[in-house]
Amino acid sequence: MVNEDETNYDVLGVEPSATKDEIRDAYRERLASAQADVTREETAKRPAGSSIAAAREEEKRVRAAWQVLSDPMQRERHDATHGIDNTGTELELSEDDEPDDDEAEDAAPVSRRQARGTPPPVFLDGHELAPSGRRAMAAFIDLVIVGAVGAAIIGIGAAIETKGNKDTVQGIVTAVALAVLLAYFVLPTTITGQTIGKRLTHIMVVDRETGNLARVSRVITRYAIPIIALLLLGFFGALLAIMAGLSFLMAKDLQSLGDRVGKTIVVVARYKPQRTSF
């Protein structure tokens, strides 16, 4: 049962006057401990009614506590709600005190939106939405790789194409292109949640409702629009696929068209998602 009087400081085991560095260190320690508990319970393969649910809940509580306390505005609201006087604690970051790369990964990726008064997009408690910059870089890397492979396939097809077997060669090229797209996007996303681009930028695709690896049907649905567009519509299809892939840039909640139809979400890869079902 959740203690209503418990604060996020209690969850992380720090004093209300703790600095952000102290809170971050406590968060990392508590998160590592919670993740170890989850792994131990899963490895033990205990029967239903075991403590694995409690271990997972504790991990969520730790993540949620950090998400609140790492953001100055959310921390102020939290302190006001619990009657905590942190007047003497410096909560704001000055312009000369920008967070380093590690801190930026830990912080809620929508903190700048919150500073502008925009409500944070939340789908999973404690899970950090992937920043738009990382997603754009991941999309660029994937586009370069797939574009290079596609150009090679088309070049080979054009080299062996003759007047008599033109339709046959085009059919083979389309089949090979489909296999490549499925192998590059669907297969690794189903197994690990990451394409090469997402792995290099440390983000991943997970199920929106559970935070676990998405079912293969949802992954296929997520990539269906750009894949079909690429295969059937040529140059126009390529533009459509790129627009669909980058549609998160135009969404206030950072969700692309594929995320919406596939019921997935892209988060910072700070934990190892589990496979619950295919």
Image: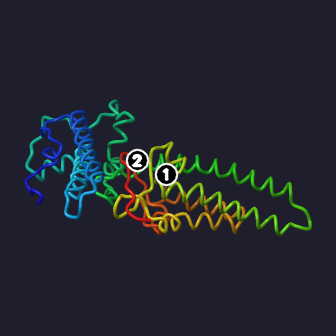
Residue name at image x 63 percent, y 68 percent = 228
Seen at 7% across and 54% down, the residue is 5
> Which numbered dot is residue 60?
none
Residue under label 2: 269
Residue 231 lies in what quarter of the image? bottom right
Q: What type is the residue that disc 2 sits on?
A: Ala
Q: Position of residue 66 (x, y in %)?
A: 25, 45
Callout 2 crowding tier (Cα within 10 Å): few <14, some 14–19, many ≥20: many
Q: CA distance from mark 1 to mark 2?
A: 9 Å
Q: Residue at x 54, y 60 (%)?
A: 186
Which quadrant is the C terminus positioned in? bottom left
Three-letter code for the amino acid on which mark 1 is drawn? Gln
Tag 2 or tag 1, which sits nearer the N-term? 1
Mark 2: secondary structure:
loop
Residue 211 drawn at (x, y percent): 35, 58
Q: Is residue 142 left or right of residue 251?
A: right
Q: Which residue is mark 1?
A: 194
**Residue at the top extreme, as displayed:** 96
